[in-house]
Amino acid sequence: MLWAGSDLSRYILILLAVYGLLALIGAVRRSWRERTRAKDEKPFISILVIAHNDEDKIEGVLRWLLGLDYLDARGRPNFEVVVVSAGACDQTPAIAERLAREFCTLTAVSVPPGAEAYEEGIACCRGEVICLMDLAKQAPGRAGRAVTRILS
């Protein structure tokens, strides 16, 4: 050893080296734990449903969506459903509003004919990811399978 100091200084150097090694191991473990936790966290999802004169199927579709098993780490629903009634002339808006009073994860919006339903709905969505279901353009069963795949 080039440096010939007292035994006390050698012990201090050894203790500092051990402390540095333990600090390095702790930092690596914390980093690994944070990466693992980030992988396990699911993003908050908004499911945007565009409905126009769909009173015959809107309640079943919304109840099915609201019953999805997509929960956060605390066991609460990690999604919201936003339903936009686009100029409906039937009971679609009334059904959506009734269900919105029953379920806190559902938001019902009615827009007049000619208004931009997609833009109104997207403005109401809070999710990191938005899934779109247009009941006039998609079969509910096919769209439901797609939503289930996304949430898996």
Image (cartoon, grey):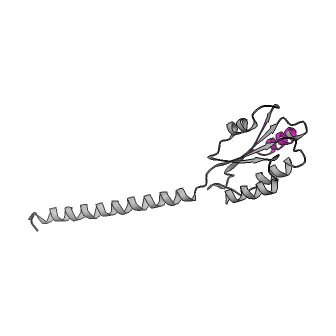
In this rendering, the answer to whether 125 lies above or below 141 is: above
Q: Which quarter of the rendering shows the C terminus? A: bottom right
Quadrant where the N terminus is found in the figure: bottom left
Location of residue 37 with respect to 127 vertically, above or below = below
Q: Quadrant of residue 22?
A: bottom left
Pinpoint residue 112: horizontal percent, then vertical percent. 81, 31
Q: Is residue 98 above or below residue 26?
A: above
Residue occupying image coordinates x 89% and y 44%: 55
Q: Is residue 35 magenta?
A: no
Residue 52 falls left or right of residue 31:
right
Residue at the far front in the pictured view: 137
Residue 7, position as x, y percentages in the image: 13, 66
- Along the horizontal axis of the image, is 11 left or right of 148? left
Q: Which residues are magenta?
A: 93-109
Residue 20 percent coordinates (x, y)? 29, 60
**Residue positioned 67% across, 56% down in the render:** 150
**Quadrant assignment, res 26:** bottom left
Q: Residue at x 90, y 48 (%)?
A: 56
**Left-right relation of 108 to 17:** right
In the image, 58 versus 44, the foreground residue is 58
Q: How many marks?
A: 0
Q: Residue at x 90, y 36 (%)?
A: 89
Residue 97 colored in magenta in the image: yes
Image quadrant in which you'd find residue 11: bottom left
Could you tell me residue 135's position as x and y percent? 81, 47
Closest to the observer, 10 or 138: 138
